[in-house]
Image (tube, rainbow, N blue to C red):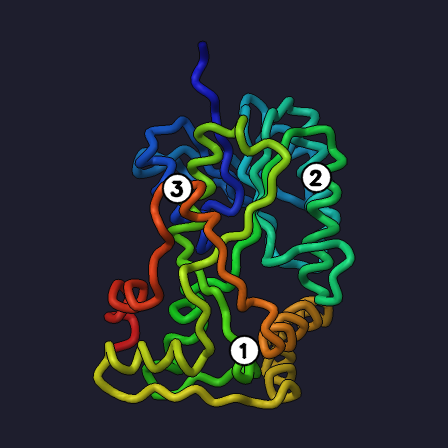
Amino acid sequence: MNTPRILVTGGTGTVGRELVQALTHFKLDFSVMSSTAVQSANGVSYVQGDFADIESLKQAFQGYDRLFLLLPVAPQQELFATNAIEAARAAGIGHIVRSSSWRADPSSDVSMARMQGQTNALLSESGITWTVLRPNMFMQNLVNFHAGEIRAGAVHAPHGNGAMGLIDVRDIAGAAAAILAAPEPHAGKTYDLTGPEALTDAQQLEIVSRALGREVRYVDIPEATAEDAMRGMGLPAIVIDWLMGLNRAAKQGFFSDVTGDVLQLTGHPPRHFVDFVNDHIATWR
């Protein structure tokens, strides 16, 4: 029996990098798709494919049995999803594990969750066997987007006192790898991935402050201020709408649930926020 071959999209991103490590640990046969030509390195093979170019996807997907599908957050999301699903069907992909977003639902009042839910609906109607992961907010956001603010002593966000069941992306990767290794029991299932506790921004920064030995404050800012900052960064209007929808939802407790799905999928409980902080403390020194 041939060893199943796995293709990872989004393999150079926050979740994808950790998934590469997890799949390596599982000793699975996998490659990573990149939109640019990348030489294989460190034992990882790369194939070239572009979500905007369906023919390149058909070529990239050829010869693979399972696909980890992580689409970029971009205005062309529907096109990217349609292209990926059609290419997967043409290539004979047998199972797609899709990384979606928290509580994604095509009928959601939250624009990001609605968009992601619509993409999941396309997948469920594709005829390809699928599993959907819906992770909560990433702990790694404090490294990827707020490291400078933490070093400066204050993090600004319009989240009020909304608690979040933050998850370490290493646990998302572990869950995805476990499914990709043995997908059959997970066919047609959706998993909601969280950490073990729900924390507000202020509570998160209290833990960071204790680890650093100095105060890092949470500053709750008006939504208009956050929106102006995104505009200043040049983000497309639709992406700003998605992100601001998440900010408003966070304030209202949209992310506050905690589940046992990571334990169910990986056999170990998800990492606590304090452990994440201790692992990344040098980033904020």
Observer able to see residue 12: no
Q: How many neighbours does mark 1 have within 10 angstroms: few (below 14), some (14-19), or many (20 or more)?
A: many
Q: Which mark is residue 48?
A: none
**Residue lying farthest to the top in this orientation:** 1
Please give the label number shown on residue 266: 3
Hey, which quadrant is residue 204 in on the image?
bottom left
The residue that mark 2 highlights is 123
Name which residue lies at 37% across and 54% down. 270
Which residue: 68% across, 68% down? 242
Q: Is residue 169 shown above or below 165?
A: above
Q: Residue 86, percent across and down? A: 72, 33
Whole-percent x, y for residue 150 in the image: 36, 81
Name the residue nearer the viewer: 87 or 159.
159
Q: Which residue lies at the image location 39% right of the left edge and 41% below the top edge? A: 266
Chain-order first, disc 1 or disc 3: 1
The Cα atoms of the two marked residues, 1 and 3, are separated by: 28 Å
Q: Nearer the viewer, mark 2 or mark 1?
A: 1
Q: Type of residue at label 1?
A: Gly
Given residues 26 and 273, the one toward you in this image is: 273
Q: Foreground residue, 132 or 239?
A: 132
The three-letter amino acid code for the residue at tag 2 is Leu
Find residue 278 and report its horizontal and vertical position in percent: 25, 67
Judged by depth in the image, the label closer to the viewer, 3 or 2, is 3
Q: Examine the rendered structure and indicate whether residue 105 appears above or below residue 149.
A: above
Category of crowding for the residue at label 3, using alpha-carbon neighbours closer than 10 angstroms: few (below 14), some (14–19), many (at least 20): some
**Residue ID for mark 1:** 162
- Label 3 sits on a secondary structure element that is helix
Q: Is residue 252 left or right of residue 202?
A: right
Task: Give how far across and how far down residue 57 sits, in percent.
Answer: 63, 35
